[in-house]
Amino acid sequence: MAEEAMDELFEIKLMVGGTYYPLTIRRKDERLYREAARRINDKLNRYREHFPQLSEEKYYVMAAVHIAMVNVMLEDFNDTAPYKEKLQQMDKELDSILDNIAAEPDAE
């Protein structure tokens, strides 16, 4: 029952860049949405401080590019495909070695 409550949909108002956006989300994801909004707002504020001459649109674009770049970096960091391939290769080699050992007549 508690897990069902966490999957329950509900509406929150998320403030990003000074504007409130109504979103319907799963209750268990609320913390993630609020943290994402906080990070976006922090990034927007930093760009506003460092580049006061730019338009609001440019702040949003710069924040989006930064967040997307971080996301790509994390995807690359978490890409385990090369490791899986190497482990599969090593597993096959080990199986082959064990098969050869099992096929050898006893040396005794």
Image: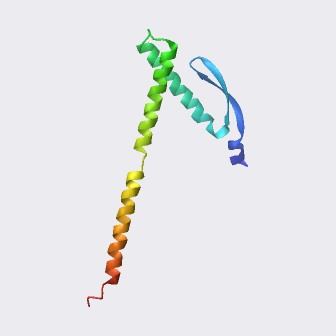
Which residue is found at the position 64% from the left and 21% from the top? 20
> In the image, residue 28 lies at what x, y percent?
64, 40
Q: Does residue 86 appear left or right of residue 39 in this picture?
A: left
Q: Does residue 49 appear left or right of residue 90 in this picture?
A: right
> In the image, residue 55 lies at what x, y percent?
49, 11
Q: Where 34 falls versus 88 (above or below)?
A: above
Which residue is found at the position 34% from the left and 73% from the top? 96
**From this viewpoint, which residue is outermost toward the right?**
1
> In the image, residue 14 lies at what x, y percent?
63, 25
Q: Where 33 falls versus 58 (above or below)?
A: below
> In the image, residue 24 lies at what x, y percent?
69, 32
**From this viewpoint, which residue is outermost toward the bottom?**
108
Which residue is found at the position 59% from the left and 32% from the top? 33
Q: Quadrant of the C terminus?
A: bottom left
Q: Where 86 falls versus 48 (above or below)?
A: below
Q: How many marks?
A: 0
**From this viewpoint, which residue is outermost toward the left?**
107
Q: Name the colour scheme.
A: rainbow
Which residue is found at the position 45% from the left and 11% from the top? 54
Residue sitting nearer the eye, 80 or 16? 80
